[in-house]
Image (tube, grey):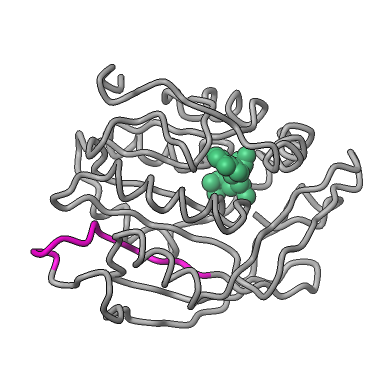
Amino acid sequence: MRVAQEVLIVSKRQKTFQLRTTDFYDGAAQRYAEFADQLDMSTILGKFFSTVARGHTVLDIGCGSGRDLATLRDIAAVAFGVDLSIGLLAKARCTSEAPVLRADASSLPVADGRIDRVLAVASLHHLPRKAQIEALHEIRRVLHPDGGKAIITLKVGRRARRDRDTQTRRARVFYLTSSKTFVRRARQSGLCITAAERSTSFRHGRKQAWLAVQVVVATRTSGEPPNRRPRAAWRRRSWVQGPSNFRRGRAAT
Ligand SMILES: C[S@@+](CC[C@H](N)C(=O)[O-])C[C@H]1O[C@@H](n2cnc3c(N)ncnc32)[C@H](O)[C@@H]1O
């Protein structure tokens, strides 16, 4: 399955703050892929996947090992992924056989309004404030203005934190913000929140708060201008991540 050439444009840049996190994923690509591939994402992504129709063009931002690209291939979507980690892009290519590109979430190599669905699963928390806002604008820009939808999941919290892989000694950085701040950023980027769900994961005795939001491009007809409070159905859920081969880094997805 191919992504039409006119959907793609040349990628512009990679930011230096990303090098460290990219190094982390490159160094742990095999272990991270084993960990990510055994996660059951149906509770979090199932509802969103049900909005993906055969032939939809779907972009997975921070596609990692390609787990979700493989699911999208199975539902006959025209899916492709971007990521900064060459190691994980290689895994994604094998797992999903989908086209994948090395590109930054805050500067997507995609033409305006060409994408029906966007997934950004556990990737935008690696971007500091300015880059995250740029990434949200990019999601808004590439989504089809009439009915384009996205799901974004990310860790939330009070401050940035580093997470070191004990095998490679490389660290990745999580730029955590509160759910409220993230929702505000999304709305200010022209995205309208249609659902928001908070959850908690427990791994290695460590509690982590997550946010999953579903968004549509805010237009006059979407019924919700971006400057109004979202009609989001906030829900809470707790979940425990399954067994992992990625123990030594003490890292959740
Ligand atoms: C926690 S992993 C999640 C991977 C996959 N979405 C999953 O759920 O398994 C975060 C991914 O985001 C990628 N990433 C981090 N910063 C990025 C950026 N600025 N642009 C694109 N991808 C990025 C990382 O390389 C990594 O593959």
Q: Nearer the viewer, residue 53 or 175?
A: 175
Q: Is residue 158 magenta?
A: no
Q: Position of residue 135 (x, y in %)?
A: 46, 48
Q: Residue at x 49, y 42 (%)?
A: 106
Q: Position of residue 36 (x, y in %)?
A: 62, 47
The quarter of the image that holds ligand 1 is top right
Q: Residue at x 46, y 29 (%)?
A: 96
Q: Nearer the viewer, residue 118 or 184?
A: 184
Q: Which image quarter is the N terminus in?
A: top left
Residue 37 seen anywhere in this rendered image of the structure: no
Residue 233 seen anywhere in this rendered image of the structure: yes
Residue at far left of view: 221
Q: Residue at x 38, y 51 (%)?
A: 137
Q: Is residue 18 left or right of residue 189?
A: right
Q: Position of residue 118 (x, y in %)?
A: 35, 46
- Dividing the picture into quadrants, the one containing residue 86 is top right
Q: Nearer the viewer, residue 12 or 93?
A: 12
Range drawn in magenta: 211-222
Q: Is residue 177 left or right of residue 66?
A: right
Q: Is residue 215 magenta?
A: yes
- Dividing the picture into quadrants, the one containing residue 157 is bottom right
